[in-house]
Image (tube, rainbow, N blue to C red):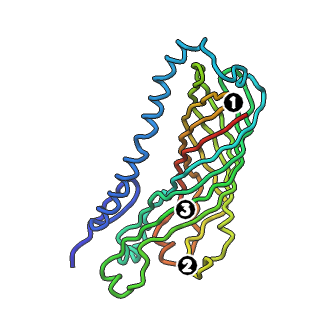
Amino acid sequence: MMRKILVNVRGKSVDGRGMMEDGRGMMDDGRTFGRLYPALLLFVLVLSPLALRGQSAIGNLGQFDRRPLHYGIQVGYTQSKFDLAFSENDTLRQTLQGVTSYYAPGFHIAIIGDLRLGSWFNLRLLPGVTLVTRTISYSWENGYLTTHRLAERSRNVESVYGDIPLELKFRAVRWNNFRPYLTAGASYGFDFASLRKNRNQTNQAIVRLQPHDLRYSMGVGFDVFLRYVKFAIEFKMAFGLLDLKVQDPDVYIRSFDNLNSRTFMLSFTFEG
Protein backbone atom coordinates (compact mmCIF):
# COMPACT_ATOMS: atom_id res chain seq x y z
CA MET A 1 0.00 0.00 0.00
CA MET A 2 1.38 3.33 -1.07
CA ARG A 3 2.40 5.58 1.79
CA LYS A 4 0.80 9.00 1.95
CA ILE A 5 3.09 11.98 2.15
CA LEU A 6 1.52 14.88 4.00
CA VAL A 7 2.55 18.43 3.25
CA ASN A 8 1.34 21.68 4.66
CA VAL A 9 0.51 24.52 2.29
CA ARG A 10 -0.61 27.83 3.77
CA GLY A 11 -2.01 26.15 6.85
CA LYS A 12 -3.86 23.42 4.87
CA SER A 13 -2.68 19.84 5.12
CA VAL A 14 -3.27 17.68 2.09
CA ASP A 15 -1.58 14.57 0.77
CA GLY A 16 0.27 14.14 -2.53
CA ARG A 17 -2.83 13.19 -4.53
CA GLY A 18 -4.73 16.23 -3.22
CA MET A 19 -1.97 18.74 -3.90
CA MET A 20 -2.81 19.29 -7.55
CA GLU A 21 -6.44 20.34 -6.96
CA ASP A 22 -5.65 22.38 -3.86
CA GLY A 23 -2.69 24.03 -5.56
CA ARG A 24 -4.83 24.90 -8.56
CA GLY A 25 -7.38 26.59 -6.28
CA MET A 26 -4.69 28.62 -4.54
CA MET A 27 -3.18 29.64 -7.86
CA ASP A 28 -6.57 30.80 -9.13
CA ASP A 29 -7.18 32.77 -5.94
CA GLY A 30 -3.73 34.31 -6.08
CA ARG A 31 -4.01 35.28 -9.73
CA THR A 32 -7.46 36.76 -9.28
CA PHE A 33 -7.10 38.63 -5.99
CA GLY A 34 -3.58 38.23 -4.61
CA ARG A 35 -2.13 41.00 -6.80
CA LEU A 36 -5.25 43.15 -7.00
CA TYR A 37 -4.66 45.46 -4.04
CA PRO A 38 -1.00 46.36 -4.72
CA ALA A 39 -2.00 47.38 -8.25
CA LEU A 40 -4.99 49.42 -7.05
CA LEU A 41 -2.98 51.14 -4.32
CA LEU A 42 -0.27 51.98 -6.86
CA PHE A 43 -3.03 53.37 -9.07
CA VAL A 44 -4.12 55.74 -6.29
CA LEU A 45 -0.55 56.78 -5.44
CA VAL A 46 0.21 57.59 -9.07
CA LEU A 47 -2.91 59.72 -9.39
CA SER A 48 -2.32 61.67 -6.17
CA PRO A 49 0.51 63.84 -7.59
CA LEU A 50 -1.69 64.61 -10.58
CA ALA A 51 -4.42 65.68 -8.18
CA LEU A 52 -2.00 67.98 -6.36
CA ARG A 53 -1.04 69.69 -9.60
CA GLY A 54 -4.65 70.09 -10.70
CA GLN A 55 -6.31 70.85 -7.41
CA SER A 56 -7.42 74.28 -8.56
CA ALA A 57 -9.48 72.77 -11.39
CA ILE A 58 -12.85 72.08 -9.74
CA GLY A 59 -15.71 71.13 -12.04
CA ASN A 60 -19.11 69.73 -11.09
CA LEU A 61 -20.55 69.87 -7.53
CA GLY A 62 -17.78 72.10 -6.23
CA GLN A 63 -19.18 72.28 -2.69
CA PHE A 64 -20.37 68.67 -2.40
CA ASP A 65 -17.56 67.43 -0.13
CA ARG A 66 -18.11 70.33 2.27
CA ARG A 67 -21.53 69.02 3.30
CA PRO A 68 -21.49 67.83 6.94
CA LEU A 69 -23.82 64.92 6.14
CA HIS A 70 -25.13 63.31 2.96
CA TYR A 71 -26.70 60.03 1.86
CA GLY A 72 -26.54 57.60 -1.02
CA ILE A 73 -27.01 54.06 -2.23
CA GLN A 74 -24.51 51.31 -3.04
CA VAL A 75 -24.92 48.23 -5.23
CA GLY A 76 -22.23 45.67 -5.83
CA TYR A 77 -21.05 42.36 -7.23
CA THR A 78 -19.28 39.99 -4.83
CA GLN A 79 -17.01 36.95 -4.98
CA SER A 80 -16.89 34.94 -1.74
CA LYS A 81 -15.14 31.85 -0.39
CA PHE A 82 -14.14 30.25 2.92
CA ASP A 83 -10.72 30.22 4.51
CA LEU A 84 -10.64 26.71 6.01
CA ALA A 85 -8.20 24.18 7.45
CA PHE A 86 -8.30 20.50 6.52
CA SER A 87 -9.20 18.29 9.48
CA GLU A 88 -6.36 16.71 11.49
CA ASN A 89 -8.54 13.66 12.21
CA ASP A 90 -6.60 10.55 11.07
CA THR A 91 -9.78 8.56 10.41
CA LEU A 92 -11.10 11.24 8.07
CA ARG A 93 -7.79 11.42 6.25
CA GLN A 94 -8.20 7.76 5.30
CA THR A 95 -11.32 8.63 3.29
CA LEU A 96 -10.66 12.22 2.21
CA GLN A 97 -7.64 13.62 0.38
CA GLY A 98 -8.45 17.27 0.91
CA VAL A 99 -11.09 19.98 1.03
CA THR A 100 -10.97 23.36 -0.72
CA SER A 101 -13.20 26.42 -1.02
CA TYR A 102 -13.61 28.36 -4.27
CA TYR A 103 -14.97 31.81 -5.00
CA ALA A 104 -18.61 32.07 -6.05
CA PRO A 105 -20.65 35.14 -7.11
CA GLY A 106 -23.12 37.15 -5.06
CA PHE A 107 -24.92 40.50 -4.82
CA HIS A 108 -24.87 43.42 -2.39
CA ILE A 109 -27.04 46.50 -1.80
CA ALA A 110 -26.72 49.12 0.96
CA ILE A 111 -27.73 52.60 2.06
CA ILE A 112 -24.93 55.11 2.71
CA GLY A 113 -24.79 57.64 5.51
CA ASP A 114 -21.65 59.80 5.16
CA LEU A 115 -20.42 62.15 7.95
CA ARG A 116 -17.69 64.68 7.13
CA LEU A 117 -14.88 64.66 9.71
CA GLY A 118 -12.66 67.20 8.00
CA SER A 119 -10.95 67.99 4.72
CA TRP A 120 -9.55 64.48 4.32
CA PHE A 121 -11.67 62.02 6.31
CA ASN A 122 -15.29 60.86 6.31
CA LEU A 123 -17.08 58.35 8.54
CA ARG A 124 -19.49 56.08 6.65
CA LEU A 125 -22.27 53.80 7.85
CA LEU A 126 -23.49 51.35 5.19
CA PRO A 127 -26.33 49.11 6.45
CA GLY A 128 -27.36 46.64 3.77
CA VAL A 129 -28.04 43.11 2.58
CA THR A 130 -25.57 40.74 0.91
CA LEU A 131 -26.54 37.52 -0.88
CA VAL A 132 -23.56 35.18 -0.72
CA THR A 133 -22.75 31.77 -2.22
CA ARG A 134 -19.57 29.83 -1.44
CA THR A 135 -18.44 26.48 -2.83
CA ILE A 136 -16.68 23.75 -0.87
CA SER A 137 -14.99 21.00 -2.93
CA TYR A 138 -14.19 17.53 -1.51
CA SER A 139 -11.47 15.23 -2.88
CA TRP A 140 -12.33 11.67 -1.81
CA GLU A 141 -10.05 8.64 -1.79
CA ASN A 142 -10.74 6.30 -4.71
CA GLY A 143 -11.46 3.43 -2.33
CA TYR A 144 -14.07 5.49 -0.49
CA LEU A 145 -15.80 6.44 -3.75
CA THR A 146 -15.98 2.78 -4.72
CA THR A 147 -18.16 1.99 -1.70
CA HIS A 148 -19.89 5.40 -1.48
CA ARG A 149 -20.93 6.21 -5.04
CA LEU A 150 -23.31 8.94 -3.89
CA ALA A 151 -20.61 10.93 -2.09
CA GLU A 152 -20.85 14.62 -3.03
CA ARG A 153 -17.79 16.23 -4.60
CA SER A 154 -18.92 19.78 -3.79
CA ARG A 155 -21.47 21.73 -1.81
CA ASN A 156 -22.73 25.27 -2.24
CA VAL A 157 -23.20 27.23 0.98
CA GLU A 158 -25.71 30.07 0.69
CA SER A 159 -26.08 32.98 3.10
CA VAL A 160 -28.25 36.08 3.34
CA TYR A 161 -26.40 38.61 5.48
CA GLY A 162 -27.80 41.69 7.10
CA ASP A 163 -24.65 43.84 7.35
CA ILE A 164 -23.81 46.90 9.45
CA PRO A 165 -20.39 48.19 8.29
CA LEU A 166 -18.67 51.25 9.75
CA GLU A 167 -15.81 52.63 7.65
CA LEU A 168 -13.30 55.46 7.70
CA LYS A 169 -12.74 57.04 4.28
CA PHE A 170 -9.54 58.92 3.44
CA ARG A 171 -9.87 61.19 0.39
CA ALA A 172 -6.98 62.41 -1.74
CA VAL A 173 -6.95 65.92 -3.19
CA ARG A 174 -9.64 66.44 -5.80
CA TRP A 175 -8.55 66.78 -9.42
CA ASN A 176 -11.25 68.36 -11.57
CA ASN A 177 -14.19 65.89 -11.34
CA PHE A 178 -12.10 63.02 -10.01
CA ARG A 179 -11.04 62.11 -6.44
CA PRO A 180 -9.37 58.81 -5.39
CA TYR A 181 -9.83 57.45 -1.87
CA LEU A 182 -8.99 54.61 0.54
CA THR A 183 -11.29 52.95 3.08
CA ALA A 184 -10.79 50.80 6.17
CA GLY A 185 -13.37 49.55 8.63
CA ALA A 186 -15.19 46.77 10.41
CA SER A 187 -18.64 45.25 10.07
CA TYR A 188 -21.10 42.98 11.83
CA GLY A 189 -23.17 40.52 9.81
CA PHE A 190 -26.14 38.34 10.73
CA ASP A 191 -26.83 35.36 8.46
CA PHE A 192 -30.60 34.89 8.16
CA ALA A 193 -30.09 31.66 6.20
CA SER A 194 -28.43 30.12 9.27
CA LEU A 195 -31.85 29.98 10.97
CA ARG A 196 -32.77 27.03 8.75
CA LYS A 197 -32.48 23.48 9.97
CA ASN A 198 -29.92 21.07 8.50
CA ARG A 199 -32.01 20.56 5.34
CA ASN A 200 -32.89 22.92 2.53
CA GLN A 201 -36.19 23.21 0.66
CA THR A 202 -35.36 20.20 -1.53
CA ASN A 203 -34.52 18.06 1.55
CA GLN A 204 -30.79 18.05 0.79
CA ALA A 205 -28.21 18.26 3.57
CA ILE A 206 -26.53 21.67 3.92
CA VAL A 207 -23.46 23.08 5.62
CA ARG A 208 -24.85 25.06 8.54
CA LEU A 209 -23.08 28.20 9.76
CA GLN A 210 -23.01 30.29 12.91
CA PRO A 211 -25.36 33.28 12.44
CA HIS A 212 -22.95 36.00 13.63
CA ASP A 213 -19.83 37.22 11.86
CA LEU A 214 -17.36 40.06 12.44
CA ARG A 215 -15.15 41.25 9.61
CA TYR A 216 -12.51 43.86 8.86
CA SER A 217 -12.21 45.40 5.41
CA MET A 218 -9.89 47.46 3.22
CA GLY A 219 -10.82 49.20 0.01
CA VAL A 220 -9.76 51.60 -2.71
CA GLY A 221 -11.88 53.60 -5.13
CA PHE A 222 -12.46 56.90 -6.83
CA ASP A 223 -15.26 59.45 -6.82
CA VAL A 224 -16.51 60.94 -10.08
CA PHE A 225 -18.44 64.21 -9.72
CA LEU A 226 -21.25 64.30 -12.25
CA ARG A 227 -23.59 67.21 -12.84
CA TYR A 228 -26.20 66.24 -10.25
CA VAL A 229 -24.76 63.29 -8.25
CA LYS A 230 -21.44 61.88 -7.12
CA PHE A 231 -20.69 58.47 -8.59
CA ALA A 232 -17.99 56.11 -7.28
CA ILE A 233 -16.39 52.79 -8.18
CA GLU A 234 -14.89 50.85 -5.28
CA PHE A 235 -12.88 47.63 -4.82
CA LYS A 236 -12.91 46.08 -1.35
CA MET A 237 -11.79 42.93 0.48
CA ALA A 238 -13.43 41.76 3.72
CA PHE A 239 -12.00 39.07 6.02
CA GLY A 240 -13.99 37.22 8.69
CA LEU A 241 -12.68 37.09 12.25
CA LEU A 242 -15.02 34.43 13.67
CA ASP A 243 -15.12 30.67 13.10
CA LEU A 244 -18.47 30.02 11.38
CA LYS A 245 -18.41 26.23 11.71
CA VAL A 246 -21.32 24.53 13.48
CA GLN A 247 -20.30 21.20 15.04
CA ASP A 248 -22.06 18.37 13.21
CA PRO A 249 -21.43 14.58 12.90
CA ASP A 250 -21.84 14.87 9.12
CA VAL A 251 -18.57 13.93 7.36
CA TYR A 252 -18.89 17.01 5.15
CA ILE A 253 -18.69 19.23 8.23
CA ARG A 254 -16.04 17.23 10.10
CA SER A 255 -13.69 17.46 7.11
CA PHE A 256 -12.46 20.91 8.19
CA ASP A 257 -11.51 22.32 11.58
CA ASN A 258 -12.42 25.99 11.11
CA LEU A 259 -14.34 28.16 8.68
CA ASN A 260 -13.78 31.88 8.10
CA SER A 261 -15.30 34.11 5.45
CA ARG A 262 -13.52 36.07 2.74
CA THR A 263 -15.27 38.37 0.25
CA PHE A 264 -14.16 40.55 -2.65
CA MET A 265 -16.58 43.30 -3.67
CA LEU A 266 -16.85 45.52 -6.71
CA SER A 267 -19.38 48.23 -5.87
CA PHE A 268 -20.95 51.30 -7.44
CA THR A 269 -22.26 54.17 -5.31
CA PHE A 270 -24.53 57.10 -6.05
CA GLU A 271 -24.56 59.99 -3.53
CA GLY A 272 -26.61 63.14 -3.64
Q: Amino acid at mark 2?
A: Ala
Q: Three-letter amino acid code at disc 1?
A: Asn
Q: Residues within 10 Å of mark 2 (few under 14, many from 20)?
A: some
Give the CA separation, mark 1 to mark 2. Answer: 45 Å
Q: What residue is pinned by disc 3?
A: 133
In this rendering, the answer to whether 76 lies above or below 194 is: above
Label 1 sits on residue: 122
Q: Looking at the picture, tell me which residue is in the foreground, 63 or 26.
A: 63
Q: Quadrant of the C terminus?
A: top right
Q: Secondary structure at mark 3?
A: strand
The residue shown at (70%, 50%) is 128
Q: From mark 1 to mark 3, how far is it between C-alphas?
A: 31 Å
Among all residues in the image, which is located at the extreme right? Answer: 68
Looking at the rendered structure, the kind of residue marked 3 is Thr
* Residue projecting furthest to the bottom: 147
> Which numbered disc covers residue 205?
2
